[in-house]
Image: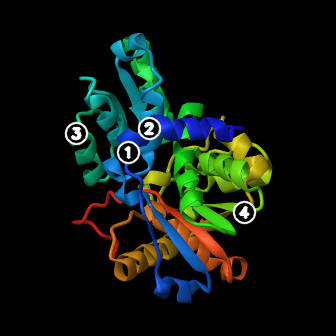
Amino acid sequence: MIKLLQIKEASKRIEKYIHFTPILTSSVLNDRTGADLFFKCENFQKSGSFKIRGVTNTVLQLTEQELEKGVVTVSSGNHGAALAKAVAKLGISPKVIMPKNTPKVKVDNVIRNGGEIIWCEPNQVSRNNTLNNILQKTSSTLVHPYDDSRIIEGQGTAALELLNQISNLDMVVTPVSGGGLLTGTLCSIIGVNKDIKVYGAEPIEADDAYRSLISGYIEKNETTNTICDGLRAQIGKITFPIIKDNVNGIFTLTEEEIIISMRLIWETMKIIVEPSCSIALAAVIKNRNIFEGKRIGLILSGGNVDLKNLPW
């Protein structure tokens, strides 16, 4: 479990390198869900997602020797772009292993921020094999996208800000993939107010976290055929035990439910969000009986969307 003090220290460490993102509300969506919704807009964050938080907290703690070796990561886009942005000022171009089906907008974001892309097949085995090959050949320093306590501390700062911005929350909902954001959120909220319930939201097409929660053991993704390209990663060895012991539940959503939610946010709030973060609203809409009458924080995790390939 990550202590609240560690997350507060991370918040101070990264504050001058990130945006303090706003909270938006929508009376239309409140009426639709029967709840008071507060959207933490990490889609407005530097590099376009919450990932810059964990990456910055990690990079700032690397030694000179670790940085001199170069850095490498695996990413479906947002983490890679955030890492590239974080180390660009140090004159470092990170190696970013990306699946071949990554949306072009996220590929461009990595390149624009100075990352070097290395392609892999769109499955966990290929990602791991490609990463291990690079680590053996180059001795590069791995900045893991989620299974690292420094990453989790940084991601937890988003929920810490949310709690400081909005009082008397009953529940918080975040997307879940590898689990860095959900784990950081859990650690922040438990440290501040254990009475606030925390839920994760996950695509049915990549529901390893949901199935792992049921079995008590890490389950592999049987498919990753989801529009939520940011939610295709495998739940982590560090993140899963914390999620298993503390989360109030994980909801699974269909592709249609996610797309409807994404369009609702675009049309009612007039902001750009990814399917991967729209899933949080989809979970609230689908489970109105749980959320109705509550004050709910939703972390909108990112806004890097290919505008030439929208799902409607």
Q: CA distance from mark 3 to mark 2?
A: 23 Å
Residue drawn where x is 37% and y is 17% of the image? 67
**Image quadrant of residue 21?**
bottom left
Q: Nearer the viewer, residue 135 or 163?
A: 163
Of callouts 4 and 2, the N-terminal one: 2
Mark 3 vs 2: CB contact within 8 A: no
Amino acid type at image mark 3: Ile
Residue 148 can be seen, yes or no: no
**Image quadrant of residue 306?**
bottom left
Mark 4 vs 1: CB contact within 8 A: no
Q: How many marks?
A: 4
Q: CA distance from mark 1 to mark 3?
A: 20 Å
User: Which residue lies most toward the top here?
Assistant: 65
Q: CA distance from mark 4 to mark 1?
A: 27 Å
Of callouts 1 and 3, the N-terminal one: 1
Mark 2 vs 1: CB contact within 8 A: yes
Which residue is under mark 2?
14
Which residue is under mark 4?
197
Of callouts 3 and 2, the N-terminal one: 2
**Secondary structure category for the residue under label 3:** helix
- Decide if residue 166 is on the left or right side of residue 93: right
Image quadrant in which the C terminus is located: bottom left
Amino acid type at image mark 4: Lys
Mark 4 vs 2: CB contact within 8 A: no
**Secondary structure category for the residue under label 4:** strand
Residue drawn where x is 32% and y is 29% of the image? 87
Of callouts 4 and 3, the N-terminal one: 3
Which residue is under mark 1?
18
Which residue is under mark 3?
111
Tell me the number on the disc at residue 41: none
Q: Nearer the viewer, residue 236 or 69?
A: 69
Observer-side mark, 1 or 3, equals 1
